Amino acid sequence: MRASQEFIKKLEELYQIYENEVKEKVKEGLLADNTARTYLLHSENFVKWCRNEFVPGGRNEKK
């Protein structure tokens, strides 16, 4: 884990707030669905990276 459990918990709480805000912007017509998916995917990947569950470019690494 790249961050403390306490930090991860707070980060996950903030991510939920962010996700709700992004979804609300879609409902308001301020964001397109595909734009919202991109925003959420990349921010979710960051949270996973903090949990040490994601490696940028990991699928492309030679094994």
Image: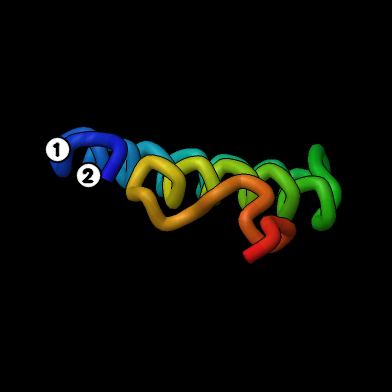
Query: Tag 1: residue type?
Result: Glu
Q: Are marks 1 and 2 in contact (CB under 8 Å)?
A: yes
The residue sitting at 33% across, 38% down in the picture is 11
Q: Could you tell me residue 26's position as x and y percent? A: 74, 49
The residue sitting at 44% across, 51% down in the picture is 48
Residue receiving disc 2 = 9
In three-dimensional space, the C-alpha distance between marks 1 and 2, rounded to whole angstroms, equals 5 Å
Q: Is residue 16 left or right of residue 63?
A: left
Of residue 51 and residue 59, the one placed in the foreground of this image is: 59
The dot on residue 60 is none
**Image quadrant where residue 8 sits:** top left
The residue sitting at 68% across, 56% down in the picture is 61
Q: Secondary structure at mark 1?
A: helix
Q: Could you tell me residue 20's position as x and y percent? A: 51, 48
Residue receiving disc 1 = 6
Q: Secondary structure at mark 2?
A: helix
Q: Is residue 15 left or right of residue 11?
A: right
Q: Could you tell me residue 27's position as x and y percent? A: 72, 52
The residue sitting at 74% across, 49% down in the picture is 38
- 15 relative to 60, above or below: above
In this rendering, does residue 23 appear at all? Answer: no
Query: Tag 2: residue type?
Result: Lys
**Image quadrant where residue 30 sits:** top right
Q: Quadrant of the C terminus?
A: bottom right
Count of marks overlaid on the render: 2
